[in-house]
């Protein structure tokens, strides 16, 4: 259905009230609009959340970095606060799509969509993020549930994404040359209490590599993973890369990320 009611919400309460069974939120529209145009999704009501002022912006403290859900990828990549506290996150945002996508696409839209090849889900898992919604706070470990599937309930709005400020971190992506989506992307982070490694693009949805984490917890360096062989079990095999190739690239990207920490 390409005919729908278009409504703009002035605040979070209004946005969640406007949601009915066949309604959805619109942020940057970079995924939602092509899906509607291609007939992959249909809604009776589209609720624009871009006019809700307190959903956009960046706040930093010594322990965490909070990014409002409608903050665009361009705003994250250009932010001095992000560049200072978590430079790897600014680099990740700069590597998303093309300028048009970065100027419209938002962090909230990206993680709500949970594309298996998207970049931000890897940042959320590696940086132990907490997703603040209109109803609750969801740890990243519980947020990403499957391919294009999250823990969000119907009408639940992402308000802010809160990242832990790491001691060291880096993201390395092997991009699809056309879309810039990750064929494989690896985010490594040395946090105060633990080491986390998140992998996107390789499987049906983002995951933490326990194998890499256990080695890097003892020695957070590129050479520490020289002898590791990443298993391709459960990895995607498609026109872009075989599962075995993706497994190889996970190690290459992990080493690249670790070398730049
Ligand atoms: C050509 C192209 C190239 C791209 N390349 C990359 C890439 O390299 N890496 C990458 O990671 N991504 C890439 N993307 C995706 C892009 O970065 C957007 O982040 C993504 O499309 C969704 O963000 P959006 O703000 O446009 O969301 P929308 O399209 O507006 O919404 C997407 C979904 O999220 C829901 N939603 C949006 N905001 C919220 C919220 N606050 N709370 C709850 N639900 C919400 C919507 O209801 C909808 O279901 C690319 C997209 C295109 C079109």
Image (cartoon, rainbow, N blue to C red):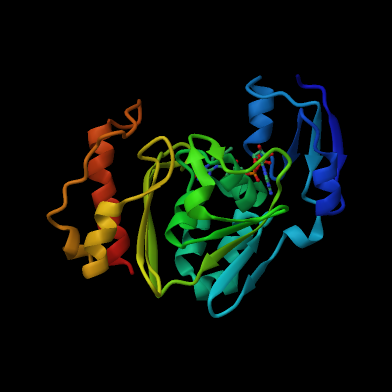
* 237 on left or right of 178: left
Residue 14, above or below 245: below
* 79 on left or right of 187: right
Instruction: Work out whether residue 106 can be spotted.
Output: no
Nearest the camera: 30 or 8? 8
The location of residue 189, given as percent across then percent down, is: 38, 65
Give the quadrant of the N terminus: top right
Residue 257, above or below 185: below
* Numbered circles on residues, count: 0
Residue at left offset 31%, top offset 51% = 209
The location of residue 212, given as percent across then percent down, is: 26, 56
Residue at left offset 46%, top offset 38% = 116
Which quarter of the rendered image does ligand 1 occupy? top right
**Residue found at the very far left of the displayed protein:** 227
The location of residue 19, given as percent across then percent down, is: 80, 38
Instruction: Work out whether residue 21 can be spotted.
Output: yes
* 71 on left or right of 98: right
The location of residue 203, given as percent across then percent down, is: 37, 37
**Residue found at the very far bottom of the displayed protein:** 62
Residue 227, above or below 31: below
Residue at left offset 21%, top offset 61% = 215
Give the quadrant of the C terminus: bottom left
Residue 147, above or below 106: above
């Amino acid at each position: 259905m390409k005919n729908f009611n278009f409504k703009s919400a002035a605040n979070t309460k209004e946005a969640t009230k406007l949601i009915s069974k066949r309604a959805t939120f619109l942020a940057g529209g970079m995924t939602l609009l092509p899906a509607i145009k291609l007939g992959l999704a249909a809604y009776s009501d589209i609720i624009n959340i871009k006019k809700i002022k307190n959903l956009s912006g960046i706040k930093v403290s010594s322990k965490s970095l909070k990014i409002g859900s409608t903050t665009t990828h361009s705003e994250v990549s250009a932010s001095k606060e992000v560049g200072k506290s978590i430079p790897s996150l600014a680099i990740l945002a700069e590597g998303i799509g093309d300028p048009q996508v970065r100027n419209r696409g938002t962090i909230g839209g990206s993680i709500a969509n949970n594309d298996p090849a998207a970049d931000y889900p890897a940042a959320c898992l590696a940086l132990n993020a907490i997703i603040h919604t209109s109803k609750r706070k969801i740890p990243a470990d519980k947020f990403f549930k499957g391919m294009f599937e999250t823990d969000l309930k119907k009408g639940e709005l992402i308000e802010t994404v809160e990242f832990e400020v790491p001691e060291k971190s880096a993201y390395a992506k092997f991009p699809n040359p056309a879309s810039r989506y990750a064929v494989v992307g690896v985010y490594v982070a040395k946090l105060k209490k633990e080491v986390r490694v998140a992998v996107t693009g390789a499987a049906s949805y983002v995951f933490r590599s326990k194998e890499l984490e256990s080695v890097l917890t003892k020695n957070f360096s590129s050479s520490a993973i020289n002898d590791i062989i990443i298993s391709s079990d459960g990895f995607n095999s498609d026109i872009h890369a075989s599962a075995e190739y993706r497994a190889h690239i996970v190690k290459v990207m992990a080493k690249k990320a670790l070398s730049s920490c």
